[in-house]
Amino acid sequence: MAWGPIQGHDKIVAMFRRAIERNRLASTFLFVGPEGIGKSRFAKRFAQALLCTTRSDAELEPCGTCPTCKQVQSGNHPDVTWIQKPEERSFLPVRLFLGDGEQRGKEGLCHEISMKPQSGSRKIAVIEDADYLNAEGANSLLKLLEEPPPRSVLILICTSLDRQLPTIRSRCQVIRFSPLSDDEVAQVLLNQELVENQKDAQSLAENSKGSVTQALAGLDQELTDFSQQLAQAWSDPRFSSVKLAAETLSFVDQAGKESRQRRLRLKTLGEKSIDFFRTVQQTQLGVTANSSWEPTASNMLKNWSGQAEYFAEEAIEVTIEMMQHVDRNVHLTTAIEGWWDQMAKTREKCLQQA
Ligand SMILES: [Zn+2]
């Protein structure tokens, strides 16, 4: 069952309905889950449902056509404050919460949410990039989290609980969003007209790990080419980790100005690398992997004096570690250099055993 255009997450909808029926809706929520599974869209529809003038709260089913629903959809409803990290900043600036200079305390999310609703029945605020909340930003929210105004709803959206300070975590109701099923990803791609047909949707969905964003990364031909280039490099034990680290860094930088885009590209590169190393293991076992990696994987098995499988196994661990660093917001240069440094060390270890 989909909730309007929202695929997956039925249990969360049901949980909210029960809470509203019992008049037990909390005031502050932390939406947690991987990128590209619909958390922001869910938050927007939730805001619509709570403000829609033609449906009751407990139905939690916005009509989508009343002026209120349309204003929320287009980001123009006076009772909804929606905050995103400005592109050029590495953190959410405090002015978004408290106002700036002379306007301090008279503007920003904390001020807005404490005002009387103008046209709706509630004040709602959404912090879309809560991953980028630093200590100063988190502190500026504490008072609001401790004493939320009556009938206000604050939603923080993030990809990992690890990235939230305990002061935030402990004051919010944590709502965990799971990755979508392949079918749900395919459905989103089709509904949003991001692909032309069912077949393309399915094939992108199969490599998406349940994330629409990941699925779309599959359309990134440069990424596919670069990961092939890395696989080629690994297939020869003489690969230069210093040169490849520099190339990886420059490739990741080209993903865009936004740190989010660069992180996603590096993580997807990690996924693809793991996919390649798994193909090496399967090929060694004589399992026909039937993937585009197979010729390179076979080559690697020939070149590594019997150590390719061992290297592949270790390289998967090293790559998972790199991806965890990315999740923990480690500086990308550090994550990339560390990754290649570990690759070089792993190679030495494997070749000593040869
Ligand atoms: Zn409506």
Image: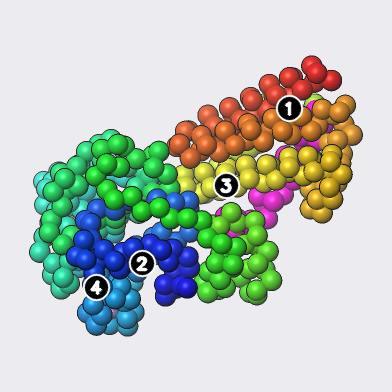
Q: How far apart are labels 4 and 2 at the CA level?
A: 13 Å
| Label 4 residue SS | helix
Q: CA distance from mark 2 to mark 1?
A: 53 Å
Q: Quadrant of the C terminus?
A: top right
Q: Is residue 75 visible?
A: no
Residue under label 2 = 14
Q: Which residues are magenta?
A: 213-237
Circle 2: residue type: Ala
Displayed quadrant of residue 321? top right
Q: CA distance from mark 4 to mark 3?
A: 40 Å
Give the label on residue 265, or none. Answer: 3
Q: Amino acid at mark 4?
A: Asp
For the residues carrying marks 4 and 1, which lies nearer the camera in this image? 4
Q: Residue 240's mark?
A: 1
Q: Earlier in the sequence, mark 3 or mark 1?
A: 1
Q: Residue at x 11, y 52 (%)?
A: 106
Q: Residues within 10 Å of mark 2 (few under 14, many from 20)?
A: few
Q: With 50 as the anchor, is 14 left or right in this view? A: right
